[in-house]
Image: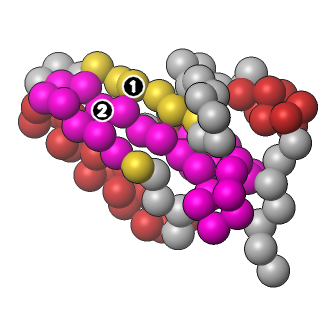
Amino acid sequence: MPTPLLSAGQVQSRLKQLKGWSHPGNAITKTLKLKDFVHAMGFVNSVALLAEGMDHHPDIDIRWNKVTLTLSTHSAGGLTENDFKLAKAIDGL
């Protein structure tokens, strides 16, 4: 059974529970600035392990010490509960 999409109201409610995430289009995104490239890569590796364990994978853009994460459930065509669970887990890193 496919994961159901969240309504606009549900998305806004969940977004308020996260710090630093924005909602462009059918995704949520956050950019983090880390100390340097090595720290950025370490963070990305931590996100990769977390995402693999949740079987839900973000789009990741790395620019030296800046990492941008974009979450969306592509198979559902938008945002689902899985995106917000992963965002909360990432914030806990």
Spatial CA span between label 1 and label 2: 6 Å
Query: Percent x, y for residue 16?
Result: 74, 21
Residue drawn at point x = 42 percent, y = 38 percent? 69
Query: Percent x, y for residue 64?
Result: 13, 29
Residue drawn at point x = 68 percent, y = 58 percent? 77
From the image, which quarter does the C terminus lie in? top left
| Residue 31: numbered disc | 1
Residue drawn at point x = 47 percent, y = 41 percent? 70
Q: Is residue 47 left or right of residue 20?
A: left
In the rendered image, is residue 25 in sight?
yes
Amino acid type, residue under disc 1 in the picture: Thr
Magenta-highlighted residues: 60-89
Asked whether 7 falls inside the magenta stretch, the response is no
Question: Which is nearer the N-term, disc 1 or disc 2?
Answer: 1
* Residue sitting at the far bottom: 1
Query: Percent x, y for residue 10?
Result: 86, 37
Contact check, label 1 and label 2, Cβ < 8 Å: yes
Q: Quadrant of residue 43?
A: top left
What secondary structure is marked by label 1?
strand
Asked whether 77 falls inside the magenta stretch, the response is yes
